[in-house]
Amino acid sequence: MKRALPVTSRDIARFLGVSQSMVSRAFDPAGKVSPANRARIMEAAEKLGYRPNAIARSLSTRRSGIVAIVMGGMENPFYSEVLDKLAAALDLAGFRSLLFRAPPGQDVDGQLPALRQYNVDALIVASASISSRIAEEWRRDSRRIVLFNRTISDADVPSVSCDNFGGARDVANMLADRGHRRVAYVAGPRQTSTNREREAGFLAGLMGAGSSLVGRVDTASYSFAEGFRAAEAAIATKPDAIFFANDILALGGMDYLRGTAGLSIPRDVSVVGFDDIAMAAWPSYLLTTVRQPLDRMVELTIASLERDSATKEMNNIPIEIVLRNTIS
Amino acid sequence: MKRALPVTSRDIARFLGVSQSMVSRAFDPAGKVSPANRARIMEAAEKLGYRPNAIARSLSTRRSGIVAIVMGGMENPFYSEVLDKLAAALDLAGFRSLLFRAPPGQDVDGQLPALRQYNVDALIVASASISSRIAEEWRRDSRRIVLFNRTISDADVPSVSCDNFGGARDVANMLADRGHRRVAYVAGPRQTSTNREREAGFLAGLMGAGSSLVGRVDTASYSFAEGFRAAEAAIATKPDAIFFANDILALGGMDYLRGTAGLSIPRDVSVVGFDDIAMAAWPSYLLTTVRQPLDRMVELTIASLERDSATKEMNNIPIEIVLRNTIS
DNA sequence: CTGAAAGCGCTAACAG
DNA sequence: CTGTTAGCGCTTTCAG
């Protein structure tokens, strides 16, 4: 089996009797080439099946057109959606996406050197943490980076995230408005910034509304199974409402409460989640939750990569509560 | 902001007073370098923060260490799982994964030229079709390719897929054994090979068992909403069991049947799915389904990329029926 | 075992 | 506008 050598810019230059660099320019939209020549070149390229080699280009320009997405916790459906939408948007913006799985609950510092080898143009870190030192270093390298739904306190790293604090506080207020006085919180993994912010916001809201937190239970991961497990501990505190740090936990919790505990939602207890993943709207759940404006977040993420924009207003994107059937 | 120029092999060569090519060899496990020198080189590399540039290497070796995953229909949770596991396995095997989203229900032929530009070592096509002409051409280029859960009839392209036909046939038999005589089938999108095979197997099983297909309804995509919609048409044919082409359709169907139609499963009607996605095991559904041995399939896929192995026995990986609560 | 030299395919000054 | 000339950083003969 002979390996067909790929056709190069030199091949088509020779074919046309022009210089190789002219061929190169012809493929640069801003390149100085006479229209006539450009046309001939394009035609020849088409005929001979020539495509500029991205690797070679990358070697000389030090840019690759590749964006790395670092992401952990893909067992959380929210992040499947994120990945799908990010990839779609990057595609539209003319980038390729290189996918890196982050070790769950660990930082991605160890992965970064590997990324550098690929001249990756930008880095999107979603659902994974990164040390501020590394993030800054990456930036200083004048490569783009944006944290998706994560924030770093002590560094000036662009990040896109919604108003987790405000959303959770709104939940507390809504619960209070509807007469819930005894509420429990099922927390996400401690090290995640989403959990910290949501918990803080929820507590703040409770405080302001004069409600009390009767129970708080920790989980090891944002997963259905953990939500299921946590619900048992949470219900033991006799709450009239349980706020779960995210939807997948809430869904697992609902199945414990209704199935195993034989409770009725929202008659016996109300439940609220966070994210508004697809399953939250399934008729079996109809979970009341806080919607993250994913499309907008993705849009901002891409925008932030394209121009190295002001970072501050990208955080605290307003969220909205979606009222469905799990709250009385 | 000064851009820290990356340290190159030449830098470390100069630093040590050896030749650049020796440094290069030192990083080739099979390279001829005295142990002493290799040690010095590694140490210096460590100290100066040197990492071989993958792009440059790729330019000269024509291999990149990158595997492209082409995949459509990520709204089907099954494929989120597939992606997650494939990425994990590739990572372990020392590959990076470049993610391409395929236009839903369309072939990926148009994308391939773009992939070539990146010297991608191999291509995994999952949940997307590819013309046999293109697939063969890619192979002739001596790049690896494997179709995941898709088969191509007229070409000799390696593919890994489970026994969709046999699995569906088993479902038909099981249904018959349990006394179901009137069964309906909710099909997946027509152009998918998974649907064709499952439907054919199911029909074959029905035929053999002397049951009859009382209804058949088409869907436009493997999605919850389509399953929900299709269930209405399916139940109108008064079946005592409905077989859905995959789990996400079945889940949507269950919600229509129980919620909207007020039926009890499996008392009024049995339902069976295919894939065994995570949600099928959720207490709210406990769907009886056909499990695809995902881990094994992923394993075979990676193996097929590594050695250009025999292709034939990779198809028809045996499946297994998971009995849960949706069948009487 | 080690070094010199020739590329891989493309971009980017720099002259004409 | 066009051609010439250097590289980008690494791998790979080919001599020593």
Image (tube, coloured by chain):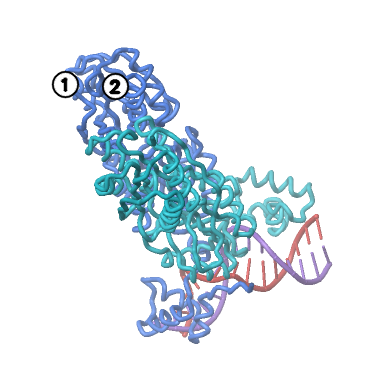
Chain colours: A blue, B cyan, C red, D purple
Pick the front one: A137 or A41:
A41
**Given the image, on which type of amino acid does mark 2 rest?**
Ile
**Toward the viewer: A142 or B122?**
B122
Chain letter of disc 1 in the image: A
- Expressed as whole percent of the image width and height from the top left, the position of residue A291 reads 26, 37
Where is residue B236 shown, x and y percent of the image?
A: 24, 47
- What is the spatial separation of the Cα atoms under label 2 and label 1, in whole angstroms? 13 Å
Mark sitting on residue A242? 2
Q: Relative to residue A118, is residue A166 drawn left or right?
A: left
Residue B12, numbered label? none
Q: Residues within 10 Å of mark 1 (few under 14, many from 20)?
A: few
Q: Residue at x 67, y 54 (%)?
A: B14
Residue at 76% across / 49% down in the picture? B37
**Up-down relation of residue B114 to residue A281 (above or below):** below
Q: Element at badge 1?
A: loop
| Residue B23 image-quadrant placement | bottom right
Q: Residue furthest front?
A: B210
Say which residue label 1 marks.
A178
Q: Is residue B314 left or right of residue B231?
A: right
Q: Is residue B279 left or right of residue A167?
A: right
Q: From the viewer's perspective, is residue B43 above or below residue A4? A: above
Q: Is residue A97 visible?
A: no
User: Residue at horizontal 68%, vertical 58%?
Assistant: B20
| In the displayed structure image, the side of residue B211 where residue B85 appears, left or right | right
